[in-house]
Image (cartoon, grey):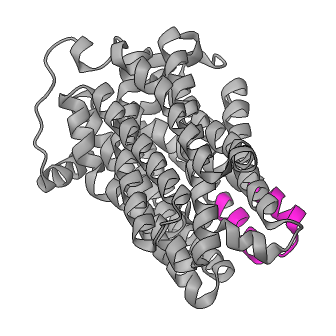
């Protein structure tokens, strides 16, 4: 008997880079990759200057805490706005905020007036820009590509993000050397323009959909209603919990602590070591995107996503404990490969199973857990790292995710087996 996923568009015969065959998605992909490049450059330059000025692991933890808190609070409301308003305008508003933050960093650097409260405020604004970009962009994908191209589009959108992350350290380091941090960030503002300009007249969004957009309330009760509406949907519920567990304990908090890891590994110039560590993580993710997309490997399934997440925990935990720089690069490459693999698989399953009438809210709910819960990883890795060391805090956090996902895997397998057993029993 066919299961539900067998009937989904993503289960049709694989076509390599299917979504890139759509001209609208190609423009969206390029614009998204360029915006992520700008985002990465800003982080590389600002994290390095802030670390050099304050040398504070606690501030690194706050960078994670404050950056992702807007996702925790606003993901579902912004997803609901994407259901009823034009998602293009929400994304453009996010781009304008990104530009302001880069320009503000640059101004504070050039005037040498940066204080800790400045850094904290700009990190919060950056998080607000990100939540205005994330859920609406995922909702907009459904308006751009055909249903059988959706899985490809979700994966390639994540790949565009990691393409920006991979190029960010190299381009950011180049801008630092050639122009300095201030001028480099002023140039960085321009990289947000391609996506912003393209969205102005792109023929997508709810204005071009058939019928009128569903009106939804922007209240806390909306989160509860969304949770109830998908609680019995195994792919959505399990993948939302998976994303939440990975984000709650680890997220990307170790990237904010990467300058400290670079110093502790003690391999040559700390600045170059720092950039190489970030690049290894991004290169692994980028490789996963292109390998999985071109070969059609790893068919989306909750069980597969859980196993990949547990392997990711092993790679990150090993990175936290070793002191050999070449091995650290290999482990971060593996971690990046596995992270993109399970994250995009979880995102794909959620979007394929989301009811169209509340798609934006379901995407917002997934973003709230998979991104918003990164708020707490700033405590588990960053602030705890101030007390017990960043190596031990990252290893313990990875172990916690491994245990939670292991339980989720057992439950998922059990429910799937029970469902198949009931389906196979003869009726009457």
| Viewer-closest of 243 and 96 | 96
The answer to whether residue 373 is seen in the rendering is no
Labels in figure, total? 0
Judge whether residue 322 is colored magenta.
Answer: yes
Q: Residue at x 69, y 68 (%)?
A: 259
Q: Is residue 74 left or right of residue 219?
A: right
- Give residue 208's quadrant in the image: top left
Q: Residue at x 52, y 17 (%)?
A: 27
Taken as a whole, is the magenta stretch helix, strand or loop? helix
- Report the magenta residues as a range: 312-332
Which quadrant of the rendered structure holds the C terminus? top left
Q: Residue at x 27, y 57 (%)?
A: 73
Judge whether residue 25 is colored magenta.
Answer: no
Residue 30 percent coordinates (x, y): 57, 23
| Viewer-closest of 425 and 248 | 248
Residue 181 percent coordinates (x, y): 63, 52
């Amino acid at each position: 008997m066919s299961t539900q996923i067998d009937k989904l568009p993503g289960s049709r015969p694989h076509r390599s880079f299917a979504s890139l065959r759509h001209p609208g998605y190609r423009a969206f992909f390029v614009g998204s990759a360029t915006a992520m490049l700008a985002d990465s450059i800003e982080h590389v330059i600002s994290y390095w200057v802030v670390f050099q000025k304050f040398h504070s692991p606690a501030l690194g933890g706050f960078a994670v805490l404050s950056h992702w808190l807007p996702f925790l609070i606003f993901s579902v409301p912004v997803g609901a706005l994407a259901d009823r308003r034009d998602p293009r305008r929400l994304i453009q508003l996010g781009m304008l905020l990104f530009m302001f933050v880069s320009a503000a960093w640059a101004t504070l650097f050039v005037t040498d007036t940066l204080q800790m409260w400045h850094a904290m405020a700009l990190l919060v604004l950056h998080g607000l820009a990100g939540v205005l970009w994330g859920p609406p962009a995922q909702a907009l994908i459904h308006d751009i590509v055909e249903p059988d191209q959706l899985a490809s589009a979700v994966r390639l959108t994540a790949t565009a993000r990691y393409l920006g992350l991979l190029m960010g350290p190299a381009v950011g380091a180049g801008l630092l050397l050639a122009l300095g941090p201030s001028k480099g960030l002023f140039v960085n503002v321009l990289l947000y323009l391609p996506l912003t300009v393209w969205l102005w007249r792109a023929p997508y969004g709810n204005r071009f959909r058939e019928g009128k957009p569903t009106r939804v309330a922007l209240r806390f009760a909306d989160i509860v209603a969304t949770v109830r509406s998908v609680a019995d949907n195994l792919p959505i519920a399990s993948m939302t919990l998976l994303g939440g567990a990975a984000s709650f304990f680890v997220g990307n908090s170790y990237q904010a602590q990467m300058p400290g890891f670079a110093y502790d590994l003690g391999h040559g110039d700390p600045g170059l070591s720092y950039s190489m560590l970030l690049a290894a993580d991004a290169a692994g993710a980028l490789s996963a995107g292109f390998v999985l997309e071109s070969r059609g490997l790893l068919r989306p399934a909750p069980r597969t996503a859980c196993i990949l997440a547990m392997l990711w925990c092993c790679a990150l935990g090993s990175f936290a404990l070793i002191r050999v720089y070449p091995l650290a690069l290999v482990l971060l490459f593996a971690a990046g490969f596995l992270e993109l693999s399970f994250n995009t698989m979880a995102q794909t399953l959620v979007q394929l199973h989301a009811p169209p009438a509340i798609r934006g809210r379901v995407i917002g709910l997934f973003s709230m857990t998979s991104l918003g819960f990164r708020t707490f990883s700033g405590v588990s890795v960053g602030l705890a790292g101030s007390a017990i060391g960043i190596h031990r805090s990252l290893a313990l956090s990875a172990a916690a995710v491994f245990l939670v996902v292991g339980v989720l895997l057992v439950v998922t397998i059990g429910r799937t087996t029970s469902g198949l057993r009931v389906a196979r029993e003869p009726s009457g």
